[in-house]
Image (cartoon, rainbow, N blue to C red):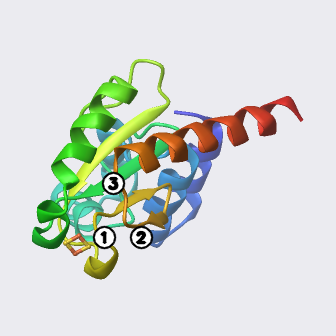
Amino acid sequence: MNKKIKGLIREEKNLVKILLEVQKEIGYLPKEIMEYISKEKNIPLSKVYRIATFYKAFSLTPKGKFHIKVCSGTACHVRGSENLLNFLCKYTGSEPGKISKDGKYSIEKVNCLGVCAIGPVAVINGKYYGKLNQLKLKKLLEKIENEDKERERI
Ligand code: FES
């Protein structure tokens, strides 16, 4: 755990703010840090976990550079979301709930994202993409990877 996080935990009183900052800094909430927060702030670990699992903004598992949510709700399912998910697993070498070996991708299978009319839907780093099929998704991933390479070059 780095000094910045230790200092934040020491100084901040609001548990949600602490968890938000840790999430922002590391990308998820590691078990060791939640245990540290519990000890340092004298808050039961069960309460830290309750808050961490209540809000969707928090993740207890690490995410890839590109975190992809694939909707498996009914409307998306009947329009082929399972095919998209299978394609994604092959393309990224990852699977739902895991991170790819290169750390680039993580996939999450989720229930209805509330935009059924444009299903099947995927969300990549918070941005929604609808009416997807394998070809569109492949082109989208290639575009995102190219843009990322460009950003790294600058
Ligand atoms: S079922 Fe996929 S957005 Fe509703």
Residue 136 horizontal side relative to residue 147, left or right: left
User: Label 3 sits on what residue type?
Assistant: Lys
Q: Quadrant of residue 112?
A: bottom left
Please tell me how crowded label 3 is: few (under 14), some (14-19), or many (20+) other residues with Cα within 10 Å: many
User: Label 1 sits on what residue type?
Assistant: Tyr
Q: CA distance from mark 2 to mark 1?
A: 9 Å
Q: Quadrant of residue 121?
A: bottom left
Identify whether 82 is placed above or below 12: above
Residue 53 horizontal side relative to residue 64, left or right: left
Q: Residue at x 14, y 67 (%)?
A: 73
Labels 3, 1: front one: 3
Q: Quadrant of ligand 1?
A: bottom left
Identify the residue position indicated by label 1 in the image.
55
Identify the residue position indicated by label 2 in the image.
16
Q: Residue at x 28, y 73 (%)?
A: 113
Dots 2, 1 in contact, CB < 8 A: yes
Within 8 Å: ligand 1 and the Cβ of disc 2?
A: no
User: Label 2 sits on what residue type?
Assistant: Val
Q: CA distance from mark 3 to mark 1?
A: 17 Å
Please tell me how crowded label 2 is: few (under 14), some (14-19), or many (20+) other residues with Cα within 10 Å: some
Query: In the rendered structure, which disc, 3 or 2, sits on the residue that comes first in sequence?
Result: 2
- In the rendered picture of this protein, how many numbered marks are placed on residues? 3
